[in-house]
Amino acid sequence: MKLLTRARTLYIYILALMLCIGCEQPVLHQEFDWATAPNANRNPYGQARRLEMPRLDAANLYNCYTTKIQGQEVVTFSIEYDTQKRHAKWVAFTFDNQTAQTHWNRNNWEWTEWEGDPFQPDPLLPHDVRIGDEEHRRDRYDRGHLCASADRLYSKDSNEQTFYYSNISPQLNGFNAGIWLDLENKVQQWGSNSNMRDTLYVVKGGTIRDGEYYDSRGQHGSIVKDIRTMNGIVVPAHFFMALVCRKSDSFYGIAFYFDHKERHTGSLSDYAITIDELEELTGIDYYCNFPDKVEEAIESKCNPTLWGLQ
């Protein structure tokens, strides 16, 4: 009788374990008919229909930055730019077998005070909404990349585009060189790992909605209530990333959200949330170009173990 009871207990345990493991598997896109299940919020035109793109806000400027490799146009990153705040709402890009290659070392830039500094105003933006070197050098923040320099090493031209000031956000050094760098390093590891991904879709940014940013020449942590009172440039109060990994017929997603402060405790998994939760926090509709059912599935789940996070 005891043996029978133990056998039943073991069977129930194994069944429960199998169910738990099954819940952690990536979403199979074979479950969905991509042709008949489009996303109702899909962006309407051109490069904006790429899968990494969030839903565009018509009030902002949208630019897609490209370079040519062996005659082929390759997307470096895309950006939505708030011309009033003069700061990116987000940047979006992908890692694949081409963009994950390394053919350039950012140390090859000649870092001198007067020449060779690759930071530059964005030539695709109208002159009156550009940010330049002068605005950033008059504050105490790092010139933090959104699409990181190390994210785009497949060519010199693509790496140079990451130094456009439209892709730069003021960041505290402890944040930029701390947990943000830790996550950037992870993203680059995931992006370069072809065993993990066919394509890694990435959206990054800082919060610039009213009530969610500071003044670079004010007291850090003091929310600016009216953009017209700004003395410096916009400093996001939070930074975020949303990622979707595609491998063969499966997709899975994860998001991260950080307060913009010098020090963070804990591991990256402590800051992991679902993309749905990040949408609530930021008001951005991520991955809107996926079919609805796929989008709903990948945005509602967050499993750090699938990303090798503990």
Image: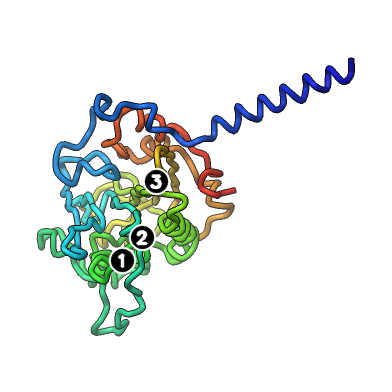
Q: Nearer the viewer, residue 9 or 127?
A: 9
Work out whether mark 1 precedes mark 3 in sequence or the reverse, and give the earlier one.
1
Kindly tell me whether residue 127 is visible in this rendering.
yes
Q: Please tell me whether mark 3 sits on a helix, a strand or a loop.
A: strand
Q: Nearer the viewer, residue 302 or 233?
A: 302
Mark 1 in CB contact with mark 3 (< 8 angstroms): no
Q: Is residue 96 left or right of residue 118?
A: right
Badge 1 is on which residue?
154
Q: Please tell me whether mark 1 sits on a helix, a strand or a loop.
A: loop
Question: Mark 1, mark 3: which one is toward the viewer?
Answer: 1
Q: Name which quarter of the figure residue 175 lies in.
A: bottom left
Badge 3 is on which residue?
243
Identified by mark 1, the residue type is Tyr
What is the C-alpha distance between the residues marked 3 and 2?
Answer: 16 Å
Work out whether mark 1 precedes mark 2 in sequence or the reverse, and give the earlier one.
2
Image coordinates for residue 232, horizontal then vertical, percent: 26, 62
Number of the label disc, if any, that sits on residue 38: none
What is the C-alpha distance between the residues marked 1 and 3?
Answer: 20 Å
Identified by mark 2, the residue type is Ala
Mark 1 in CB contact with mark 2 (< 8 angstroms): yes
Residue 114, placed above or below residue 3: below
Identified by mark 3, the residue type is Leu
Kindly tell me whether residue 261 is visible in this rendering.
no
Q: Name which quarter of the figure residue 164 lies in.
A: bottom left
Residue located at (87% from left, 20% from top): 3
What is the C-alpha distance between the residues marked 1 and 2?
Answer: 7 Å
Number of the label disc, if any, that sits on residue 100: 2
Image coordinates for residue 250, horizontal then vertical, percent: 42, 38
Residue located at (20% from left, 50% from top): 82
